[in-house]
Amino acid sequence: MPVALVTGASRGIGAAIAQRLAAEGCAVACVARTMSDGDSHLDGSLSATVDRLRASGGTAHAIAADLSKPDFDPSEIIAEAEGALGPIDYLVNNAAAAFYPSYLEMPRKRIEVSFRVNVVAPWMLAQQVIPAMVRRGSGSVLNLTSQTAIMPQGPPFTVAEQIKGATAYGGSKAWLERATVGAAAELFGTGVSLNCLSPDTSVITEGSTALVDLSKYPNEPLDAMAESAWALLSGNPAEFTGLIEYSLSFLKRHDRPVRTLDGTGLLEGWQPDDFPVDYLIDPGPDPQTEQ
């Protein structure tokens, strides 16, 4: 049975990916700060995620850990996960710290937390699991990133690009993307892949809705993120490595069916031919242009 470790798995995208991996037969180590319902002001917990996976016949283990702490020890997390489930085949770094003060107003503490959670923790966790993956000749690391990592285009800058607040979060995710592609290049040919994945549009989760009202914006289902995550994790490492991908765009280009989180069927209304073109960051070449 393959083993996966997913950070930020108490709710939202992390919990969805954990469920999708379990549906594919993976034993899943779920990592987050919130162990039980009521431990956070947000809905969702590790206990709820693990109970859901086990109720559907999966194997799961909960690990409470705060990746924002300066002294967090990645080796302890990996040791507990492997002690409970076995060697890790898939690492999904989904946990994120998102703060949106402007550049001039961002406190030092929040800058440091952003980079500890969004850059340092994924890097250190990957360092813990990749050597064994290389020895086995297989394994995959997936880092969840964000559209905010895309550089604003200008000058002049559009009104949308002048919106304050995404500089620290986007900057940390851009760093993560560069580190991921660099590591993929260093490890190319070992059988180990490293990729980045971001939503094409907004994804309504417990965490995102606490920051902004997303109901007025285009949204994509959690199932699309989970499907594209599984496709990248399980893909041929000679082809799918060093990629910075966007969920719907990736699924569209590869004509990949979107399955429900439990893996039992196709998600109605969200198959590649159903995707609104204006939702896609990278829809691929226009067939008419190619002709």
Image (tube, grey):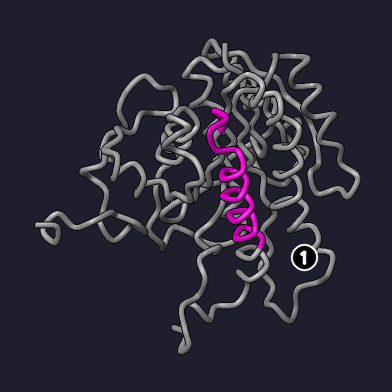
Identify the image quadrant of residue 97: bottom right
Work out which residue is located at the far right of the displayed protein and give it.
71
Say which residue label 1 marks: 111
Residue at (60%, 38%) from the top-left corner?
187
Residue at (57%, 43%) from the top-left corner?
184
- Left/right placement of residue 118 relative to residue 248 reads right
Residue 265's spot in the image, x, y percent? 32, 23
Choose between 240 and 188: the one closer to the eye. Answer: 188
Residue at (79%, 57%) from the top-left corner?
113
Residue 199's spot in the image, x, y percent? 46, 51
The relative height of residue 96 versus residue 161 in the rendered view (above or below) is above
- Left/right placement of residue 216 relative to residue 289 reads right
How many badges with numbers are in the image? Answer: 1
- Left/right placement of residue 86 relative to residue 66 reads left
Choose between 104 and 156: the one closer to the eye. Answer: 156
Give the residues drawn in magenta, as a range: 172-192
Whether 75 is among the magenta residues is no
Residue 166's spot in the image, x, y percent? 60, 69
For the residue labelled by badge 1, is the local secondary structure a helix, a strand or a loop? helix
Choose between 238 and 224: the one closer to the eye. Answer: 238
Residue at (60%, 64%) from the top-left corner?
170
